């Protein structure tokens, strides 16, 4: 898909389809662009709207063919809802509805005139970015493992229309949107791949490919190297699998050499059967999504490179499978982490924290400005927050606020959860420094408290994305690409 920002006379624009925003009030309210087009057509648009065929509810649409007084062949009136209630989320939802509708018709190019529904140059830049991200979300399709291969979309080009004085802001927003959408799509695709294709070795090869395509320095540690580093916790998880574990390290250097990097760590469990503490068979196929945290790190660092951010960023993805085998971890086993702490494994299905804790210790060598780990860590987070917000834990109030604000700004929201020492007591073990689970109560919190024991030497935050990284069941099943938008927004704030 090709995206561009464009300033043009809407009346003279020979557009296959002009998309015009309509807000809801006591009656549908045309945007300034809509009023210009309506005046040129001697009130044709407002007359049709008065008939009541368009409610202006978010996502409602009315297609006008061969409209009067303009060069456009079609005008698509798009409901945005109440003007004062337009949010990042509602705006994206409306755009997605419009893009799907346009793509269903034989329309190859469309001009969106929606930015006059928001005010301020920063608002226009933001909504231009949202528009591109929403369009890509609407058009995303997974075809990689289908015999028919990739089918091209009918819609090939979207122009984001702007006034000339706003063109620079809108162009910047489009560029950001293209980079973030590419990162999201990449994360979704590698997450949607099945576990027999997307293995730890496959992820390592994808990182190496990004070194060539995006200039991101990539280092892949094998099991022998991890053993020398005494990563006993991480290595214990892969013992039940024939696929060797990998520690994937990606370094983007856009800042000064002396500048401390931001470290992003993503859980890369390419398939999680639960190990000896095996999961129920129902929906176990979705455990290919246990590497969505790692996928989001791939997507975010790729977007940072596309945007040429002036930051130093390190992405670390500890990757493994968790399968039952004679060599696999057993409940009651004790392993020693890279930090030297001993861990009693009471449940082998609580393996994500076992690979993340060694990655958190490994991150210390970079003397990071901040560390954010991302993981589909606990079903308990879904019980706490559902599927709308990622759980956020942090040892730094300032870092937590940055991430919360980034979530609100990007529409990829998070909610801060407690990280009190009261919960850490649940991890007490009679036989090791700590246990890998703390019981049913507060499961997402105790998992975060476990990780906190390995993140004491820097500002750290943990995002539990178990409820937001993918959708379950039926035609909706698939990865969401979250929290790539949140992570990139956070990086842009530090840029």
Image: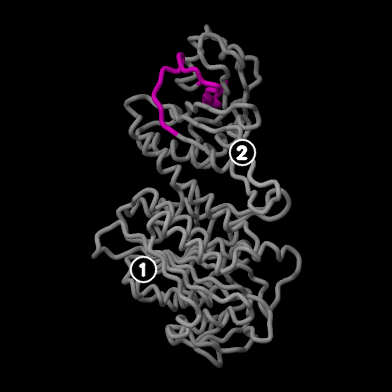
Q: Residues within 10 Å of mark 2 (few under 14, many from 20)?
A: few
The quadrant in which residue 385 appears is bottom right
In the picture shown, does residue 397 fall above or below 471? below
Question: Tag on residue 152?
Answer: 2
Residue occupying image coordinates x 46% and y 14%: 11
| Residue 371 visible in the picture | yes
CA separation in Å, label 2 and label 1? 45 Å
Q: Earlier in the sequence, mark 2 or mark 1?
A: 2
Residue occupying image coordinates x 55% and y 84%: 435
In the picture shown, does residue 181 fall above or below 74? below
Question: Tag on residue 486?
Answer: none
Mark 1 highlights which residue? 459
Residue 467, percent across and down?
60, 59
| Residue 404 visible in the picture | no
Q: Is residue 150 magenta?
A: no
Residue occupying image coordinates x 39% and y 73%: 363
Using residue 473 as the reference point, say whether residue 214 is left or right of it: left
Front position in the image: 65 or 126: 65
Front position in the image: 348 or 389: 348
SS at circle 2: loop
Residue 429, percent across and down?
55, 88
Residue 134, percent across and down?
53, 40
In the picture shown, does residue 310 fall above or below 2? below
Q: Residue lying farthest bottom? A: 431
Colour theme: one colour
SS at circle 1: loop
In this rendering, the label closer to the viewer, 2 or 1: 2
Residue occupying image coordinates x 63% and y 27%: 106
Residue 382, percent across and down?
61, 61
In the picture shown, does residue 416 fall above or below 79? below
Q: Does the magenta stretch include residue 23?
A: yes
Give the residues drawn in magenta, as a range.
Answer: 4-30
């Amino acid at each position: 898909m090709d995206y561009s920002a464009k300033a043009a006379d809407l009346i003279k624009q020979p557009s296959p389809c002009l998309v015009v925003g309509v807000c809801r009030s006591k009656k549908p309210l045309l945007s300034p662009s809509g009023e210009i087009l309506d005046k040129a057509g001697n009130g044709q648009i407002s007359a049709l709207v008065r008939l009541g065929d368009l409610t202006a509810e978010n996502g409602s649409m009315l297609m006008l063919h061969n409209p009067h007084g303009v060069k456009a062949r079609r005008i698509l009136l798009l409901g945005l809802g109440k003007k004062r209630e337009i949010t990042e989320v509602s705006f994206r939802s409306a755009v997605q509805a419009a893009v799907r509708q346009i793509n269903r018709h034989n329309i190859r190019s469309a001009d969106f005139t929606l930015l006059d529904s928001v005010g301020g140059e920063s608002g226009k830049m933001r909504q231009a970015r949202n528009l591109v991200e929403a369009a890509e979300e609407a058009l995303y399709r997974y075809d990689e493992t289908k015999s028919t291969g990739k089918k091209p979309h009918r819609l090939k080009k979207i122009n984001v229309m702007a006034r000339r004085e706003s063109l620079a802001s809108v162009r910047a927003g489009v560029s950001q949107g293209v980079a973030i959408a590419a990162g999201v799509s990449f994360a979704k695709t590698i997450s949607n791949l099945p576990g027999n294709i997307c293995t730890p070795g496959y992820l390592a090869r994808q990182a190496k490919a990004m070194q060539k395509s995006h200039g991101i320095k990539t280092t892949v540690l094998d099991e022998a190297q991890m053993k020398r580093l005494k990563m006993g916790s991480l290595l214990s998880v892969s013992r039940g699998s024939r696929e060797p574990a990998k520690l994937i390290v990606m370094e983007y250097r856009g800042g000064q050499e002396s500048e401390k990097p931001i470290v992003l760590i993503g859980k890369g469990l390419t398939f999680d059967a639960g190990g000896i503490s095996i999961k129920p068979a129902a929906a176990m196929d979705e455990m290919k999504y246990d590497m969505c945290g790692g996928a989001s790190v791939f997507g975010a660092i790729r977007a940072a490179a596309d945007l040429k951010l002036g930051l130093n960023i390190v992405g670390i993805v500890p990757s493994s499978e968790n399968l039952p085998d004679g060599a696999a971890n057993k409940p009651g086993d004790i392993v020693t982490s890279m930090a030297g702490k001993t861990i009693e494994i009471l449940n082998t299905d609580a393996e994500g924290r076992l690979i993340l804790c060694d990655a958190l210790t490994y991150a210390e060598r970079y003397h990071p400005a901040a560390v954010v780990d991302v993981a589909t860590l606990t079903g308990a987070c879904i019980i706490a927050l559902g599927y709308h917000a990622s759980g956020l834990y942090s040892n730094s109030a300032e870092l937590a606020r940055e991430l919360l604000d980034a979530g609100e700004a990007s529409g990829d929201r998070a909610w801060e959860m407690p990280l009190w020492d009261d919960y850490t007591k649940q991890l007490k073990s009679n036989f090791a420094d700590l246990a890998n689970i703390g019981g049913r109560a507060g499961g997402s919190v105790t998992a975060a408290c476990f990780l906190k024991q390995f993140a004491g030497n820097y500002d750290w935050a943990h995002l539990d994305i178990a409820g937001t990284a993918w959708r379950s069941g039926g035609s909706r099943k698939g990865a969401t690409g979250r929290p790539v938008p949140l992570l990139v927004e956070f990086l842009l704030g530090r840029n």
